Amino acid sequence: MRKDKAYLHLVNLINSRIGPKHMMYLQVRFDDYKNSRVMVVTSGVARSPVFLKDGGVERFYLGTGASTTELTASQTHEYVGKRFGAGA
């Protein structure tokens, strides 16, 4: 996949799954790795909760070490309150 096509695909996924306002927090670059060209995406720290749209459902995930954990509604409520404050 060419760089511009891969980048456009990423932008379309971000826009449809979490919203275009979050694109500004992502840094994208292309590097060589083991004779291949790879897309490297890094993210800044969120200032507000970011929910993933999965069809008609919004999901909330938390990075836990080297993995990701989906939180239940009550866990999300508690985490968002503690992490972002009551006004989030």
Image (tube, grey):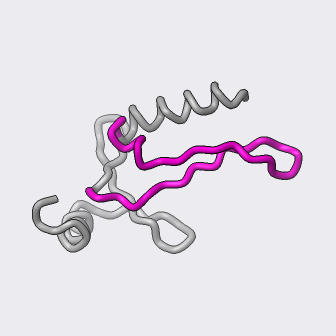
Q: How many marks?
A: 0
Query: What segment is highlighted magenta in the picture?
Result: 19-48
Q: Quadrant of the N terminus?
A: top right
Estimate the x, y position of residue 35 in percent, counting from the top left: 88, 46
Estimate the x, y position of residue 39 in percent, counting from the top left: 66, 44
Estimate the x, y position of residue 17 in percent, counting from the top left: 39, 38
* Image height of 64 relative to 29, above or below: below
The answer to whether 23 appears left or right of 72 in the picture is right
The answer to whether 61 appears left or right of 48 in the picture is right
**Front residue (pair 19, 21):** 21
Seen at 39% across and 61% down, the residue is 45
* Image height of 25 relative to 45, above or below: above
The answer to whether 17 appears left or right of 76 in the picture is right
Q: Quadrant of the C terminus?
A: bottom left
User: In the current view of this chain or complex, which residue is farthest to the right?
Assistant: 35
* Magenta stretch holds residue 44: yes
The answer to whether 43 appears left or right of 47 in the picture is right
Seen at 48% across and 47% down, the residue is 26
Seen at 64% across and 27% down, the residue is 4
* Magenta stretch holds residue 42: yes
Can you tell which quarter of the image residue 36 is in? top right
**Front residue (pair 21, 58):** 21
